[in-house]
Amino acid sequence: MTIKEVCEKYDITADTLRYYERVGVIPAVTRTTGGIRDYQETDIAWVENAICFRDAGMPVEMLIEYVKLFQEGDSTIDARTNLLKEAREAIVEAKKKYDIALEKLDYKISRYEIAQKTGVLTWDDCKEE
Amino acid sequence: MTIKEVCEKYDITADTLRYYERVGVIPAVTRTTGGIRDYQETDIAWVENAICFRDAGMPVEMLIEYVKLFQEGDSTIDARTNLLKEAREAIVEAKKKYDIALEKLDYKISRYEIAQKTGVLTWDDCKEE
DNA sequence: TTACAACTTGGAGTTAGCTCTAAGTCAATA
DNA sequence: TATTGACTTAGAGCTAACTCCAAGTTGTAA
């Protein structure tokens, strides 16, 4: 699979894919004899993981560390487990904050939808509990 | 309430609070005659909202736009409602991605916990469905 | 075999969101 | 009233994560 096909499949730019490889967010991608990237199943699986975890706010640094540990082999199983658990906790915490914001937004929106009927706000927009 | 007290209450730096005010993420804060910030209930409510929405990934630009519309008065009720709904959708979408990542992480972690007992990985770490 | 699009690299530039610095002002205490 | 520490502003600097650029190479189609 060419870089272009991977871009289209995952809606990501070629620059980002090359950047991920360059800094180590994904391991070195398979090349043709001419030196052109030719993504294999494994390469694509790494790309998919990287996108998925980045979308959940996992820092590039953490992904780089994971790939590094992975390449060091079975002696890093503990370290990798810890890293994944740490990432998990960060996501769980972030989700909680998202839920709090959603509650606040839903409350505000419900108020605004009432105001839309009258054209006037009947409460203090910036001071609601 | 002094800037220091607000910092401590919300675990945020004074620089960030001043930055939020400067760029318009929150409206101008009440001052003493000497020109020192003296946060009133309303100022604090804006700070609280700003932190809450930033924690949910809402861009600074969007918060600035909201405050700007708010200050323009009741004629912007529709625009504000739309903005809040747009913010809501973004958060809902982000949360979905967080859930997908969590599933992937939980699967990986469960595998790793088995591997920790044996000291060896018995599956392809970078190529699991 | 030539044209030309799509690829390559190394490195510079950009954006969002802070974070720090310098130079000066305010206010509580000795 | 003098000192000291927290405050003020304007503006520069920083970090993460891309994003773009220039100069050169590969590979396909005519």
Image (cartoon, coloured by chain):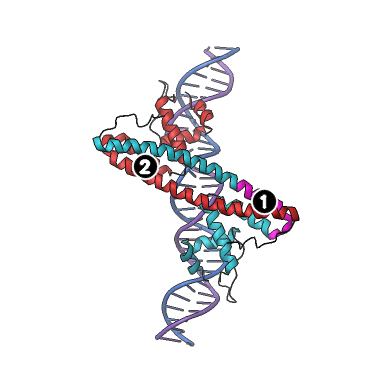
Chain colours: A red, B cyan, C purple, D blue
Residue A67 lies, with reference to residue C21, above or below; the image says above
Chain letter for mark 1, please.
B
User: What main secondary structure does the magenta stretch of the protein show?
Assistant: helix
What x and y, as percent, mark residue B127?
38, 29
Q: Which residue lies under the disc numbered 1?
A: B81
Q: Residue furthest left?
A: B118
Q: Viewer-proximal residue, A75 or A94?
A: A94
> Closest to the observer: A70 or A24?
A70
Q: Position of residue B61 (x, y in %)?
A: 60, 51
Check disc 1: other Cα within 10 Å, few if <14, some if 14-19, many if 20+.
Answer: many
Q: Categorize mark 2 by other alpha carbons within 10 Å: few (<14), some (14-19), many (20+).
A: many
Mark 2 lies on a secondary structure that is helix
- Circle 1 SS class: helix
Magenta highlight on residue B73: yes
**Of the numbered discs in the image, which one, if any, rests on residue A12?**
none
Rendered residue at 56%/65% (across/down):
B44
| Residue at x 44%, y 46% (from the top left corner) | A91
Q: Quadrant of residue A29?
A: top left
Q: Amino acid at mark 1?
A: Thr
Where does the image place residue C24, in percent across and percent down from the top left? 53, 73
| Amino acid, disc 2 | Leu
From which residue to which does the magenta span run? B71-87
Residue B65 visible in the shown view? no
Quarter of the image where the C terminus of chain B is located: top left
Give how far across and how far down residue A55 sits, in percent.
Answer: 48, 40
Q: Quadrant of residue B112?
A: top left
Residue tagged 2:
A84
